[in-house]
């Protein structure tokens, strides 16, 4: 019986540890599961509501470059362990809804979400995001804490 055929590690906080990735990697090896890593961050809104300035475009490009570089590191670490992974990133207005949609579209059986130590304001905000993911995702969810 394949308990976890599709495992996804969701990285949703600006500061995070490698703990959730390591756990996903170990579970994928143990269960012979597919592994994916998704990173989702808030899209920085343009300074002017109706159009993007060159500065806004540069900021967005920097966000994308940073995400791609980090996902490349996750792929390399998995490759060293003999595990093939899929990666995806998003700049979005709603982290929770993007993750929930990803889980549904990719038939995720286990979602692992990183929950590092955050400031009180950040913690309250990400509590709301994680609660939404817990309530709207129809899969097993594991939250890792530092």
Image: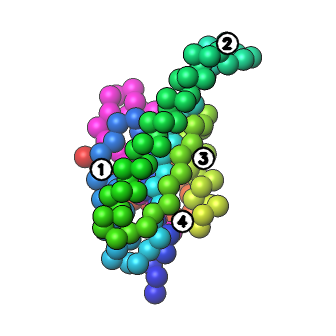
- For marks 4 and 3, the one nearer the N-term is 3
Q: Nearer the viewer, residue 107 or 25?
A: 25
Q: Does the residue at mark 2 contact the one at mark 4 (Cβ under 8 Å)?
A: no
Residue ID at (48%, 36%): 65
Query: How many marks are shown on the rendered structure?
Result: 4
In this view, the mark in front (3 or 2):
2
Marker disc for residue 48: 2
Q: Nearer the viewer, residue 96 or 54?
A: 54
- For marks 3 and 2, the one nearer the N-term is 2
Colour treatment of the image: rainbow
Which x, y percent locates residue 87? 50, 55
The answer to whether residue 145 is magenta is no
> SS at mark 3?
helix
Residue ID at (30%, 45%): 17
Which x, y percent locates residue 126? 44, 38
- For marks 2 and 1, the one nearer the N-term is 1
- Asked whether residue 134 appears in the rendered view, the answer is no
* Mark 1 nearby-residue class (10 Å; few <14, some 14–19, many ≥20): few
Marker disc for residue 18: 1
**Residue underneath mark 3:** 98
Mark 3 → mark 1, Cα distance in angstroms: 22 Å
**Residue underneath mark 4:** 108
The vertical placement of 24 against 116, above or below, is: below
Mark 2 → mark 1, Cα distance in angstroms: 36 Å
Bounds of the magenta span? 109-129
Q: Is residue 52 left or right of residue 103?
A: right
Which x, y percent locates residue 84? 43, 67
* Mark 2 nearby-residue class (10 Å; few <14, some 14–19, many ≥20): few
Q: Given the current orientation, which residue lies at the most extreme left position? A: 146
């Amino acid at each position: 019986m394949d308990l976890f055929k599709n495992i996804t590690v969701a990285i949703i906080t600006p500061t995070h540890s490698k703990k959730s990735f390591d756990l996903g990697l170990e579970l994928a090896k143990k269960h012979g599961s597919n592994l994916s890593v998704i990173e989702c961050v808030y899209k920085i809104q343009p300074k002017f509501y109706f159009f993007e300035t060159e500065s806004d475009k540069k900021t967005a490009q920097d966000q994308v470059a940073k995400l791609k570089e980090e996902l490349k590191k996750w792929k390399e670490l998995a490759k060293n362990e003999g595990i093939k992974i899929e990666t995806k990133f998003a700049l979005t207005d709603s982290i929770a809804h993007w993750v929930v949609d990803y889980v549904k579209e990719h038939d995720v059986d286990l979602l692992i979400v990183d929950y590092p130590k955050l400031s009180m304001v950040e913690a309250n905000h990400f509590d709301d995001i994680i609660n939404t993911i817990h309530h709207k995702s129809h899969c097993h969810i594991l939250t890792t804490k530092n």
